[in-house]
Image: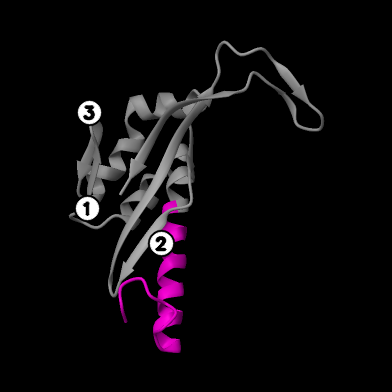
Amino acid sequence: MPKSDTATGTIEERVRAIEDRLAIYNLIASHPPSADTGADYYTRAVYAEDGVFDRGPHQGGTGNAAIASVVKTPAHQAAISGGLAHFCGLPYIDLDGDRAAVTSYLQILMPDPSGTPVELSNHGTSKGFRIHRVAANR
């Protein structure tokens, strides 16, 4: 089947492409809740043994055990306690047979320590959140 072309493939190829995209969407969507809860067991399960998590100047890792250990560090646990929230955007998926390149954005949100408390009907009071960082992931 031609690269990223689901319109001209057989029904089996088209269904496989849909299933592949759905699996990738679910994988990308699983990162925020697993990171925000410190679910190292989940991170270990979804990364390959030789996977690489490159966070630039921040601690990342090579190998699923090293990558998973990041969420158990004192620094990450402090961020969780402080209200850390990852928010991912819908990824762009470029399928090519059994290979895929996925590009997405990830926002790191945190409670706004200087915000003025605002009440929202039926949702309580909050000082709001601020975007701490936005990253493009591939």
The kind of residue tagged 1 is: Gly
The kind of residue on which mark 2 rests is Ile
For the residues labelled 3 and 1, say whether their Cβ atoms are less than 8 Å apart. no
| Residue interval drawn in magenta | 1-28
Q: Is residue 23 magenta?
A: yes
x then y, percent, for residue 21:
43, 67
Labelled disc at residue 118: none
- Residue 79, image quadrant: top left
> Which residue does the numbered mark 1 point to in the structure image?
51
Residue beneath the point at 23% across and 33% down: 56
Query: Which label sits on residue 57?
Result: 3
The number of numbered discs placed on residues in the rendered structure image is 3
Distance CA(mark 3)–CA(mark 1): 18 Å
Q: Any mark on residue 24, and which? A: 2
Relative depth, front residue between 122 and 135: 135
Is 45 positioned to the left or the right of 119 in the image?
left
> What is the distance, in whole Å, between disc 1 and disc 2 at their CAs?
16 Å
